[in-house]
Image: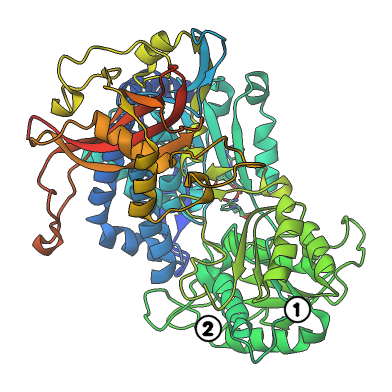
Amino acid sequence: MLKLENYITGKWITGDGDGQLLYNAVTGEAVAAASTKGLDFKSIIEYGRTVGNPALRKMTFHQRGNMLKALALHLRNHLEKFYTISYQTGATKADSWVDIEGGIGNLFANASLRRKFPDETFCIDGESHNLSKNNTFMGTHILVPKEGVALHINAFNFPVWGMLEKIAVNLLAGVPAIVKPATVTSYLTEAVVKEIIASGILPVGSLQLICGSTGDLLDHVTSQDVITFTGSASTGLMLKKTPAILDNNVPFNMEADSLNCIVLGEDVTPDKPEWDIFIKEIRKEMTLKAGQRCTGIRRIFVPENKMEDIWKAISTSLSQTTIGNPLNSAVRMGSLAGQKQRTEVKEQVQKLLAASQIVYGSLDSVEVIDADPKKGAFISPVLLMNALPWASVTGYTTNPSHEVEAFGPVSTIMPYKNMDDAIALSKLGKGSLVSTIVTADYKEARQYVVGAATHHGRILVLNDECARESTGHGSPLPLLVHGGPGRAGGGEEMGGLRGVKHYLQRTALQGSPTTITAITNVYQPNAKGKEPGKHPFKKYFEELQIGDQIITDKRVITSEDIDRFADLSGDHFYAHIKTTDFTGTMFEQQVAHGYFIMSVAAGLFVDSYEKNPVLLNYGIDELRFTKPVYPGAEVYIRFTCKEKLPNDKRVIEKPEDFKRGDDIDKGIVKWLVEFLDETNEITGVATILTMVAKKLQ
Ligand code: NAP
């Protein structure tokens, strides 16, 4: 019997004893055994802290992001192997695609996030604040990687995605991971980790794997560690109460089961496209991954006069789902992950039956293709109907339809009276990961979203406008927050930059602008500028220094200038016309267009005529006009190098994709542009971006 290996303290190690047997979910044959018996869990966590953490934290965000990209590209070369193993978990090709390629996609998405960070080991978070009258004291926030490890305890349903979506984030933040997949499908996670380690792309110590029990690992966590848990609410709660977690205030991000719902808008009738969209979404969510998705639709709310039509339509749709061996291309729904999971689903359905009845499917039989329905963990989709969603059942706050999750292809249809009723019913789930409303009525959509948002981590509004391109009810996305309040665990993960910040310590930083510029490598307003030696536009990317500053010549703004700019641009707003009666306006007299002053600024700070390392003007991040500029004003510009961001050369896969300039090595430079007048007061400010060539090509 193949014994799974744990990757700990830089070595592949098998646990003692026979271990827990793991089975092929389709054939019922044993495929591997997992054991962590005899492992020294304290040394695992210390190894992460002392070996992986220092290696990662000294890399910059850009280096870490490029590392994730290299890893994603590497894993893409081993897809066939992963798919072959994935079929053994009962997953079809489509299920496996979500798990494997969805997981790799997550690595790519997080790799791209590096562009939102500086090329530094840490970063500034948010705005800076001037805290003094004379501009000598300021404050901002910085984020530094925590000094511990990220400990991920994952659910069985997505053995690849579950790991990759989480480690992508902590690795980008500069924190190593210890991954503990759910044991039942850990053979697939192990196969992927083997490829990751073999690639040599990650620094030593940045990823460890435990296939099986975590032993006393949780007793050794400290405040610099972060735990993420994905699984059932009961296990999550039990683990969250571990004394070491409570005593050390260890962040514990919980993603638990939830009773997600879908609502059919009152406006939707069988002749509308949204009717079919609704049915299709339910069938997809019930059958993809055999319903073993944390985001799965467990409750279906329908206007009471449409109940019968809808359950019949869902049933007809479900009857077209072919179930069986995922290796057979005719199969659309595979098996559950194992016999234990099948037993659990049936037990949960029994509880649901206290308030509902089965209107489609069966707990006792299922027709399968190319497999033995007894040996494999197959189950038929089960549609339940609860005609009295508000009825009380002993032992529940209301009734089991809103409290019991059957983690399989199981969903309950229930009637609602009006939109307020639907909102109230959605909340009986006590907090969910996601809810969908299918409606073409914007007012109804607004009412539902604003009313139900407090109890949902994500809301999808689905209609004919977006259905074809919608990513679906069930898909958490790297750039959007995943998690939900209350029952769903109260956690938040992914969500672009937000996710990375979970692994970074936020520290408020106070001091003089020049000191904070020196620490952060981002020029702070009112810091001392540096004499650049030559015009900064004559410097290559590597030569530019943060704080390089020029003060330009002055230019008098005349009324004729303003007239000409109005004619040239076509902007004849009354405030720019000298004959306007200015009584009751914000201005005393004809005022210069803000964009004219911005253009004048460019005329003053741009070093022109000869070619120089500046390749192009990339845009403006912020532009504010803070004081009116009237004819006669003498304006000048303080122009300072604020921040430098590397810009990797584009990888050109096909020659026809080549665009002019792709072969030039370059970076983005942000410049602080301050517009001043003859009183030395600031009349406006902008951050402009230029693309600057590197000297070394
Ligand atoms: P589970 O039984 O709660 O297990 C979750 C994880 O906790 C597994 O890795 C499990 O390891 C581990 N675990 C259990 N007892 C432990 C202990 N005493 N110490 C340390 N670790 C322990 O959940 P599951 O059956 O794997 O997953 C299904 C559930 O997860 C469903 O309810 C589903 O809704 C939920 N889920 C939620 C999300 C989300 O993002 N919100 C995503 C996927 C799934 P072993 O396998 O070794 O027991």
- Residue 201 x/y as whole percent: 24, 37
Q: What residue lies at 14% left-to-right and 54% top-to-bottom?
A: 652
Q: Is residue 260 above or below residue 176?
A: below
Q: Decide which of 670, 307 is in the foreground and name it.
A: 670
Disc 1 residue type (three-letter): Glu
* Spatial separation of the CA atoms under disc 1 and disc 2: 28 Å
Disc 2 residue type (three-letter): Thr
- Residue 525 x/y as whole percent: 43, 19
Task: Return the disc, 1 or 2, that comes first in the chain's sequence.
Answer: 1
Q: Is residue 295 above or below residue 593?
A: below
- Residue 594 x/y as whole percent: 43, 40
Q: Is residue 101 above or below residue 238?
A: below
- Say whether marks 1 and 2 touch (CB < 8 Å): no
Q: Is mark 2 within 8 Å of ligand 1?
A: no
SS at badge 1: loop
Evaluate whether residue 620 shows in this view. Answer: no
SS at badge 2: loop
- Residue 489 x/y as whole percent: 67, 44
How many C-alpha atoms fall within 10 Å of the one at disc 1: few (<14), some, or many (≥20)? many
Q: What residue lies at 33% left-to-right and 53% top-to-bottom?
A: 568
Q: Is residue 150 left or right of residue 560?
A: right
The residue labelled by disc 1 is 266
Q: Is residue 419 left or right of residue 274?
A: right
The residue labelled by disc 2 is 321
Residue that lies at the very extreme toward the front in this rendered image: 579
Quadrant in the picture for the C terminus: top left
